[in-house]
Each structure stands twice: as structure tokens, then as C-alpha cells.
Amino acid sequence: MAHPPRTRYTKQSWGILSSCHLSPRASHLASLTAHLPSFPPFYGVIPAQYATWKVATFFTWVGIYRVLDSRFHGNDNLRFHVSFFIIHDSPPMVRIYTTSEIEKIARSGAILARTLAVLKKEIAIGVTLKHLDTVAREYIRKEGAEPAFLNYQPHGAEHPYRASICASVNEVIVHGFPTEYKIKSGDILKIDVGVLLDGMYSDSAFTVIAGKGTAKAQNLVTATRKALEEAIKAATPGNHIGDIGYAVEKTAKRYKVNIVQGLTGHGVGYGLHEDPYVYNYGNKGEGLLLKAGMVFAIEPMLCTGKGQVCQLKDESWAMVDRGLSAQFEHTIAITEKGPRILTKE
Ligand code: MF3
Ligand code: CO
């Protein structure tokens, strides 16, 4: 899911802001905000007005920290290209699931695992992404469940999602729409699916290379798969959420690949996206204390390029430098006995 990097969130955006709301002089704003720390830039295309009113309902504080460019637009309006940040300081509301609730999520997850197995068999050169979407939707419904992504509206999205799977090719990292695009040899394909059964969501994703991939692509996919394995091992009671991120980060370093910025895993269960954000980087022993009963979608997203993402017109997230990207995801429960993968058959 799209997330604020650590607790601070910066975005660059074009937006029309009325001069009566803000100083019409960019230099005033720049000096007003000069004392703020400089956050790494985060590239996005959410219009400023939209972000400030919509996002503000979820976050505590929103402010502009750097005016990158501005020009007068119409009468009193100044068109800004700004970088803004959000500080959300409310503590995450992390649910603790009972054993029977976890069993329910596991039943949803088992259907999801079977769906992914069916999709893996369907993937071939020349097959359209739309076909995979149809196969997934029909299979999930045959199992008596619902595709969780269909008509789901992620935070910040302008309209509900109109498909059952996300199918993201090459530089597109997540939320790729399953179009009539035909899979080509060498494509790095990320398939992400959610299932809703009996009120419980599960979320899982995998990456495959169609045909023969380059050694670089194969290394990236292996690294990401391994990062998920290592991250899951770290999801034990008494550990901290930083241990999960640390495991991903360490694996990425070992394989000499980078971490996709601005996208994270998340809590899952009664909702598709719940607290907390599960970062793909972190420090050992830092952050939320992990307890039995927590259920997370852990989803390392790694890449060969710098890791900056931008949102495309179809609202999918892609690598700015067009580098390759890979993603694996499982829904897991933290139990007294350790991590339990819920999205498996
Ligand atoms: N697995 C995706 C995520 O965690 C969920 C996509 S929802 C959709 O971000 F509606 F965009 F498909
Ligand atoms: Co997810």
C-alpha cells in the first residue's frame, strides 16, 4: 500500500491554491518553511487541494515545506508546484486477533493461495492480463469467496478499483491494472490478489519472469522472495516491527538490490488495509512491539534502480527510473509459536 516514509510524508504536486489561503509570493513561503528539515523528495501526482483535504482526515498535520516552482494562473490564483509533508502522530490502532479469527483469515488465505496457484499455471507468453483477472475472479467465486480488490477504493484513489487482481509489469511495481496487454518474454510480472471470505480479508502476491529473464532480473526476484522469507522469520512475539524491516533491508543489501520507497505492507483481517504500516526497512528492536494475535500483510518490494516511485495515470505505482521491480507478499499471523503464514494451501 502507499504509505508515508517513516512518519513523515512528502509529495510533490501541482495544485491551484487560492492566493487568499497562502502568500502569493513563493519566496515568503520558502522562508516560512526554511527551518523545516529536508525530507527526501517523494514523487507523486495527487493534486494538492485533494491531498490537503482528503489526506488531512487521516493525518494530523499537513504543511507545505518547499515551493519548487510557481506561476500566476488566472486572476488571484497562484499555481504551485510544491512538496508537502504530513506528520501523522496518532498511535497505530493494531488489532489483536483471537485464535478463531485467525482461523477465519486462514480460510480466506487458503482460497487465495489456491487462486495464485491457478494463476501461475495460466501465465504464459501471449496471455492477456485481463484473462488472468477473469480466471482469478471466477475461481474465487467458485470457492464461495469474493475478490477483495474488486470495487475497493484505496486511500487517495479517485475511484474504486475495477478488477480482481493487480497485474504489474516490469517497472510498474504495484496496482497495475489487468488490461489487454499480452505477456511478453522477459517481462517481470507481479500478481497481487485479495480474498474476502466470511468478513475476513487476506492479501498475497508473487512475481514471475515470463520466459527467460536476464540474470539481473532473476537475482532481483530471488532477492525479493528471500526477503519475504526472512521478514516472516522476524515476525515473532517480543520482536519489533523494525526487525521485519531490518530483515528485508539486510536481504536487499546481500543481493545488491534496492528497496522501493513509499510502499509498505500493512495490517489485514477485518479490513484489507489496517494499521500498522509494515516498512521494508528498519532498525532492529525499534518500533511497534510485536504480539501474538497481530496479523500483517508483509510485502517486500525491491528494485534494481534508485527506488523512487511515481503514480501513473491509471493510479498504478511505477519506478521513476524505469528500473525493474519485484514483490512478494503473504498474510501472516504472529502466534505464540512464531509466525504462521495464512496465505498458503
Ligand atoms: N495488495 C494491494 C496493497 O496492499 C491492494 C491493492 S487494492 C487495489 O496495496 F484495489 F488497488 F487493488
Ligand atoms: Co498488500
Image (cartoon, rainbow, N blue to C red):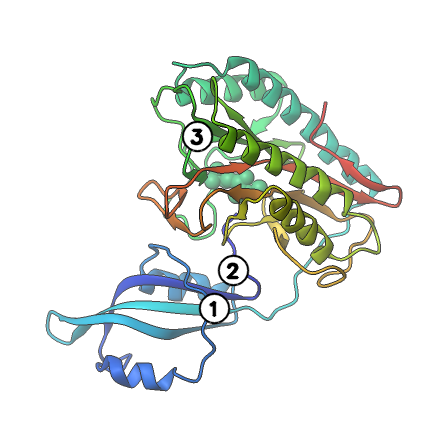
Which residue: 32% across, 61% down? 13
First along the sequence among labels 3 and 2: 2
Which residue: 63% across, 18% down? 143
Residue 221 position by quadrant: top right
The numbered dot on residue 86 is 1
According to the image, label 2 marks what residue? 4
According to the image, label 3 marks what residue? 163
Residue 325 seen in the current view: yes
Q: CA distance from mark 2 to mark 1?
A: 8 Å
Which element type, helix, strand or loop, lies under badge 1? strand
Q: Position of residue 184 (x, y in %)?
A: 38, 20
Which element type, helix, strand or loop, lies under badge 3? loop
At label 2, counting other C-alpha atoms closer than 10 Å, the crowd grade (few under 14, some 14-19, many 20 or more) is: many
- What's under tag 2, amino acid-wise? Pro
Residue 175 position by quadrant: top left
Residue 270 seen in the current view: no
Which residue: 28% across, 80% down? 22
First along the sequence among labels 3 and 1: 1
Mark 3 C-beta closer than 8 Å to ligand 1? yes
